Image (cartoon, grey):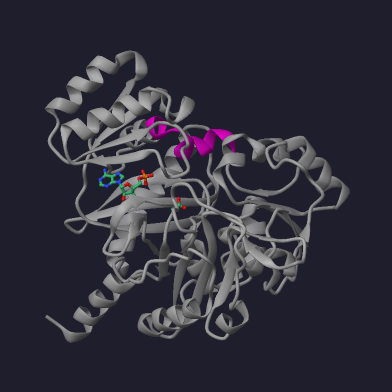
C-alpha cells in the first residue's frame, strides 16, 4: 500500500508512524510534513496542500492508494471531494460533511434537527449586532461566544461578565477573526469535565478509538487562555463503559444517521468534544478529523493494523478485524511549547536531549525545523509532543515527565499536571467510597 498524509503537526507525525508500523507495511509520503516524520516517510513533491488537483496528480503519478488528511483546513476546502471525484480513496470527510467543524452555526442547527444534546444557544450575524448585544445583556453568566467559522481553536470566549462578553462580540464582529466572525454563536456555559471521543466512520458504520482527555488551558489547574491543547491522556477513566454507550446511542449514532439524511455521509474521524455535566454528555464541538494532541495518546494505546483500518474506511467498508484492541495500557502526552504560545513567539532555538528522552517516551515533532547545519531548531508555538506508554496511568505520566526533563530549548514551556485529575479519579475509584 502507498499512502499520502497531509499535514505537518504532532498529530500527523503520530499518524505517519502508526501507518508505517502497520502489518500491511505501507510506504508513506507526507506533505508538508516535518523533520520527525521524514525519518520514516518521504516528502511528497507538492507545493500547496489546498490545491486538490495537484494532490490528485501526485497520487496518480505515485500510485497512491490512500490519502489521509490531518488538519481541518484542507477538508473545509473540499480536497477530499476533488480526490474522490478522481477515484482516489481518502480518509477524511467531504466539504459538506466538514461543515460540522467549519461552521459552528451549521453544527448547532444540525444538533437541534436531530435531537443531539448540546448547550442552549442563539446565533446572530453582524447585521443583527443590536439583537446580539441585547441577548448577551439578558443572559446569565458565564456566557460563551464562538465565531461561526474556523479559528484554529482561538474563536471561543468564555466570558464571566457582560462587559467582557460585549467586548468579545465587538472584536468578533469587528473583523478580528476575519470572515469567520461574520456570525457568532452565543451559548450557555456548561459546567463539567471535558472528554474527546473519536469515531472512525465509513459513512454508515463506525468504531470508537480509546476515549481521551485534552488539556486546553495554558496553565496548570486549567487556568489561563485556551490553546490548541497542552497535553492529553488515553484512555480517559471519566468515560466509563456505561457512559460511552450513552454517548454512542445519544450522540454518535444520531450524528452519523443525521449526516446520511443531510446527504453528507461522514467518512473519516469524527471527533466529538464532550462536556460531561451531572453525569450526562453534551456536545461542545465537533471536529471532522483527529484531535491534536489526543491522537498521539490514542494511537499509542491502539493495537491493530491502522493502515488497513483507514484504507477500509476510505473504500467505504470498515474492517473491524483490523483492530485487536483500542486501549492497551495507558498513554500520556505533554506538549512542549515556545515561550509566549498561544500568542507571539520567537523561533530558531536549538533543541537538545531528544535521544535521552526517547529512553522513556516517543517524541513527536510539531513545530521544528533543521537549520543550515542540520541541527534541530524550534519553528512554531507547539514544538514537540512527548508521548509515553505504560501499564498504568500513573506510570505513563511519570515516564512522560522523565522524558520531558531530558529535553531543552530556550523558552520551553509545558504544563506539569497533565493527567493529574484522572489519576485522582482512579485513586478514588480504587480506594472505594
Ligand atoms: P470549542 O472550540 O467549541 O471546543 O471551544 C473551546 C473550549 O471552550 C472548549 O474545549 C471548552 O473548554 C470551552 N467551551 C466551549 N463551549 C463551552 C460551553 N458551552 N460551556 C463551557 N465551556 C465551553
Ligand atoms: N484537541 C483539540 C483539537 O484538536 O481541536
Residue 320 belongs to magenta span: no
The location of residue 282, given as percent across then percent down, is 28, 49
The location of residue 404, given as percent across then percent down, is 48, 76
Residue visible at 70% across and 63% down? 35
287 and 379: which is toward the camera: 379
Task: Give the residues in magenta.
Answer: 94-106
Q: Which quadrant holds residue 25?
A: bottom right
Q: Is residue 54 above or below residue 32?
A: above
Q: Is residue 58 above or below residue 384?
A: above
Residue that extends furthest to the right in the rendered view of this protein: 61
176 and 108: which is toward the camera: 176
Residue visible at 77% across and 35% down? 53
Residue visible at 65% across and 41% down? 80
420 and 287: which is toward the camera: 420
State the predominant SS element of the stretch in magenta.
Answer: helix
The location of residue 395, given as percent across then percent down, is 40, 85
Residue visible at 52% across and 37% down? 97
Any part of residue 325 in sight: no
Residue 95 belongs to magenta span: yes
Q: Which quadrant holds residue 244?
A: bottom left
Tell me the quadrant of the picture where the C terminus can be found.
Answer: bottom left
Does residue 313 appear left or right of residue 233 in this picture?
right
Amino acid at each position: 500500500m502507498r499512502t499520502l498524509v497531509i499535514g505537518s503537526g504532532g498529530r500527523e507525525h503520530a499518524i505517519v508512524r502508526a501507518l508505517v508500523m502497520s502489518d500491511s507495511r505501507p510506504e508513506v509520503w507526507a506533505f508538508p510534513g516535518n523533520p520527525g516524520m521524514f525519518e520514516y516517510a518521504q516528502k511528497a513533491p507538492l507545493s500547496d496542500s489546498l490545491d486538490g488537483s495537484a494532490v490528485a496528480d501526485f497520487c496518480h503519478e505515485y500510485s497512491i492508494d490512500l490519502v489521509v488528511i490531518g488538519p481541518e483546513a484542507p477538508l473545509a476546502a473540499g480536497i477530499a471531494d476533488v480526490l474522490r471525484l478522481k477515484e482516489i480513496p481518502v480518509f477524511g470527510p467531504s466539504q459538506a460533511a466538514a461543515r460540522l467543524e467549519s461552521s459552528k452555526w451549521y453544527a448547532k442547527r444540525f444538533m437541534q434537527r436531530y435531537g443531539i444534546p448540546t448547550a442552549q444557544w442563539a446565533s446572530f450575524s453582524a447585521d443583527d449586532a443590536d439583537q446580539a448585544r441585547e441577548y448577551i445583556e439578558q443572559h446569565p453568566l458565564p456566557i460563551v461566544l464562538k465565531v461561526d467559522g474556523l479559528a484554529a481553536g482561538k474563536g471561543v470566549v468564555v466570558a464571566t461578565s457582560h462587559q467582557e462578553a460585549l467586548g468579545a462580540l465587538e472584536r468578533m464582529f469587528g473583523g478580528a477573526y476575519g470572515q469567520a466572525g461574520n456570525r457568532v454563536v452565543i451559548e450557555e456555559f456548561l459546567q463539567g469535565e471535558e472528554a474527546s471521543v473519536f469515531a472512525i466512520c465509513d459513512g454508515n458504520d463506525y468504531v470508537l478509538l480509546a476515549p481521551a482527555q485534552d488539556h486546553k488551558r495554558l496553565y496548570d489547574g486549567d487556568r489561563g487562555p485556551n490553546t490548541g491543547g497542552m497535553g492529553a491522556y488515553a484512555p480517559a477513566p471519566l468515560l466509563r463503559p456505561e457512559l460511552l454507550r450513552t454517548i454512542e446511542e445519544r450522540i454518535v449514532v444520531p450524528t452519523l444517521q443525521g449526516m446520511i439524511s443531510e446527504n453528507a455521509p461522514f467518512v473519516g474521524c469524527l471527533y466529538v468534544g464532550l462536556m460531561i455535566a451531572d453525569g450526562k454528555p453534551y456536545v461542545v464541538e465537533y471536529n471532522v478529523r483527529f484531535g491534536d494532541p489526543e491522537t498521539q495518546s490514542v494511537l499509542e494505546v491502539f493495537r491493530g493494523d491502522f493502515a488497513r483500518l483507514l484504507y477500509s474506511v476510505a473504500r467505504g467498508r470498515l474492517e473491524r478485524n483490523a483492530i485487536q484492541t483500542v486501549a492497551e495500557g495507558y498513554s500520556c502526552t505533554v506538549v512542549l511549547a515556545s515561550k509566549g504560545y498561544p500568542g507571539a513567539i520567537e523561533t530558531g532555538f536549538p533543541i537538545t536531549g531528544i535521544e535521552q528522552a526517547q529512553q522513556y517516551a516517543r517524541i513527536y515533532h510539531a513545530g521544528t525545523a533543521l537549520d543550515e547545519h542540520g541541527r534541530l531548531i524550534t519553528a512554531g508555538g507547539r514544538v514537540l509532543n512527548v508521548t509515553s506508554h505504560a501499564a498504568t496511568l500513573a506510570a505513563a505520566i511519570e515516564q512522560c515527565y522523565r522524558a520531558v526533563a531530558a529535553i531543552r530549548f530556550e523558552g520551553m514551556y509545558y504544563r506539569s499536571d497533565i493527567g493529574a485529575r484522572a489519576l485522582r479519579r482512579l485513586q478514588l475509584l480504587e480506594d472505594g467510597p
